[in-house]
Image (tube, rainbow, N blue to C red):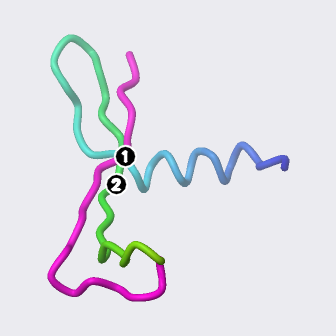
């Protein structure tokens, strides 16, 4: 699916976190949710999970 250059740049700007040492930039976002039961029908309220997805880019 084609995505415009403008949309790519907007997304990159939203996901920017910080400038790193040696001319690197860090981008990403966090997420969280509940783990599911083995049959995947019930959210386990006492089983929270979290994640970070991102990338580093050399300037």
Question: Residue 26 appears in which quarter of the rendering?
Answer: top left
List the residue tagged with mark 1: 53
- Toward the right, the furthest residue is 1
Q: Position of residue 35 (x, y in %)?
A: 31, 72
**Few, some or many residues within 10 Å of mark 2 (<14, 14–19, 20+):** few
Residue 47 is one of the magenta-drawn residues: yes
- The mark found on residue 29 in the picture is 2
**Rendered location of residue 15, percent (x, y):** 40, 51
Q: Residue at x 53, y 53 (%)?
A: 11
Question: Which is closer to the viewer, label 2 or label 1?
Answer: 1
The image shows residue 58, relative to residue 49, as above or below, that is above
Point out the tag, 2 or 1, that comes first from the N-terminus: 2
Q: Is residue 33 left or right of residue 46?
A: right
Q: What residue appears at the point 47 percent right and 77 percent down from the top-left corner?
A: 39
In the picture, measured across the screen, residue 39 lies left or right of residue 49, that is: right
Compared across the picture, whether 26 is left or right of 15 comes to: left
Question: Which sits in the foreground, 29 or 44?
Answer: 44
Q: Main secondary structure of the magenta part?
A: strand
Residue at 40% from the left image edge and 23% from the top image edge: 57
Residues in magenta?
Answer: 40-59
CA separation, marks 2 and 1? 6 Å
């Amino acid at each position: 699916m084609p995505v415009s250059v403008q949309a790519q740049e907007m997304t990159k700007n939203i996901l920017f976190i910080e400038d790193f040492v040696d001319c690197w930039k860090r981008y990403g976002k966090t997420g969280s949710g509940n783990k599911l039961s083995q049959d995947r029908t019930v959210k386990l309220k006492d089983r929270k999970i979290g994640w970070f997805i991102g990338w580093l880019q050399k300037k």
